[in-house]
Image: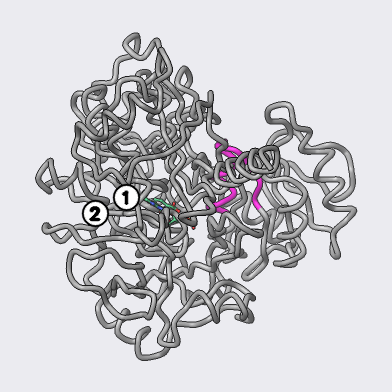
Amino acid sequence: MEGVTPFPPEFAARYRAKGYWGDRPLGEVMREWMRTHGERLAICHPVRRTYAELDRRAERLARHLLALGIGPRSSVVVHLPNVPEFVELYLALQYLGAIPLMTLPAHREHEIAHYVDFIDADAYAVPASFGSFDFLAFARKIRAGASRPPLVLVAGEAPGDEGFVSLTELAEREPDLPPSALAGLDIDPDDPCVFQLSGGTTGIPKVIPRSHNDYAYNSHLIGSLNDIRPDDVLLVAAPIGHNFPLASPGVQAFFEWGASIALVTTPRPAEALAVIEACRVTHLEVVPAMIIAWLNYERLSDHDRTSVRVINSGGQKYQRETKLQTEAAFPNAKVQEVFGMAEGLLMIARLDDPAEVRHETAGRPICPDDEVYLVDELGERVSEGEIGELICRGPYTLRGYFKAPEVNARAFSPDGFYLSGDLLRMHPSGNYIVEGRKKDLVNRGGEKISAEEVEDMLLAHTAVKMVSCVPMPDPLLGERMCAYVVPRGEPPTLEQLTAHLSSRGLARFKHPERLELVEEFPLSPFGKVQKNVLAARIAAAVAEQSLSRA
Ligand code: AMP
Ligand code: DBH
């Protein structure tokens, strides 16, 4: 398909020969799960649907969409929150070989208008209502501005406008096209089955094509490391279209195993903890910011948390201190950090790794054919135990962003390794420790300081609820470290924090030299702390102070 960088034939042949790639459309694979698990419960909250019911609804929806012109390789910008219609639409699009592009509910015109044109979307899916934002008025605007107005698929009731249809209604109404209409579709398992967005914090996120072959394998393999049992329940609290809750292991793996998912439209502690208790949730997939909010919720102890067995946290470093606090708050659970990326590669700590290894590391690759190296600035492999940039290639890692030749020339090595920009170090156990992103180092007069190393220690201070250390421009040393802290109770002073670091034996040059107390951190739509925003803020403050001094 145009704009997609294929796997070189020798790699594709190897991944097939090893049985990683099944050469079947993801929709065919998922349909088999629906049939196998028929009377089991697929969704347990906020509606209850068995696999058979879910399949029936998705299948009807698929036939309607086919009649409306959506078929293999059609593309659909999906802008839905965590609602059951998302799941039905995802299945229907897979049955059709159509390609959803996963945006976040918090995206707005800058992103959505761009993606609609960029992938030449045939359809655009929105909720009839969600929060205070008027999605229907927004969809009208998007349609009016698009080079080719997409059909608008509405979760809930559709307005009377031309070009708008209700997903909810289509899933319930018998279509004119017979079921056999879906049988003859020509779906290439090497085509993309989903477009994910990269988490790039600068510029507009790039589009990641994931193939049927690689995506089915992705969720299958990581699912096999998550101790999923048929009666288990996954809480989907992060935006469902994101690679982590969708397929790593996420909705896909829980469906493969015949377990259930519970959907919440907000990760706020009151809602999430109520559903954990009511649905006897066994598995959590969270970003650290979410779990920290739950841990600090004043009514945490009102909710039963004993059903939870496995807590996956990813997206950002899950500090050791926080892991310990998490396991104290969820007494039957093991935390299992995931180091993942929408680009593909997944690392995960194994549930049977020794506790110290689970607490200290972000895990290791999931496939024997994940080729993972840590390299220095020149692209040379660093010696064992040293920090280097993670580069990777493998059976479920992209070979190029969609329609982005210039970015691809920078983001991939000539032999197809994805250059992640992440800095890792191998732990003696063979697992990896995330030391930061390339830009997450503070370079103090040539001495590199890992921000996360300092944060991990500061988090152990009782007056620190959350901390984020960023570089602060300095005329003498180039950079110094500034600690942004969300205090717990009485705010700490910089002196108290550095005394704490000294008492823990941290080298003096690694101490933050400025403390900024804040009530909250700027978060990306997915809930990651936006360090670049904090760094820009402190840079502006420093510049202003040096001006006023001059
Ligand atoms: P995205 O491009 O949004 O899929 O984000 C992937 C990036 O998130 C990775 O390249 C890492 O920088 C970061 N990331 C994911 N998981 C972790 C983790 N467990 N610890 C630290 N960083 C992580
Ligand atoms: O940050 C991520 O993109 C991420 C984190 C954990 C991810 O894509 C995943 C697991 O699959």
Query: In which quadrant of the rendered view does residue 524 lie?
Result: top right
Note whether 150 is above or below 154 in the view shown: below
Residue 483 lies left or right of residue 259; in this view the side is: right
Q: Nearer the viewer, residue 502 or 86?
A: 502
Q: Are marks 1 and 2 in contact (CB under 8 Å)?
A: yes
Given the image, on which type of amino acid does mark 1 rest? Answer: Val
Q: Residue at x 36, y 26 (%)?
A: 495
Is residue 164 visible in the rendered image? The answer is yes
Given the image, on which type of amino acid does mark 2 rest? Answer: Gly
Query: In which quadrant of the rendered view does residue 468 lie?
Result: top left
Looking at the image, tell me whether mark 1 or mark 2 is earlier in sequence order: 1
For numbered disc 2, what is the local secondary structure? loop
Of all residues, the one furthest to the left in this rendering is 354
- What residue range appears in magenta? 78-92
Q: Which residue is mark 1?
A: 338
Query: In which quadrant of the rendered view does residue 57 lie?
Result: top right
Say if the magenta span includes residue 336.
no
Residue 2 lies left or right of residue 387; in this view the side is: right
Note whether 452 is above or below 72 in the view shown: above
Q: Position of residue 250 (x, y in %)?
A: 39, 47
Of all residues, the one furthest to the front in this rendering is 550
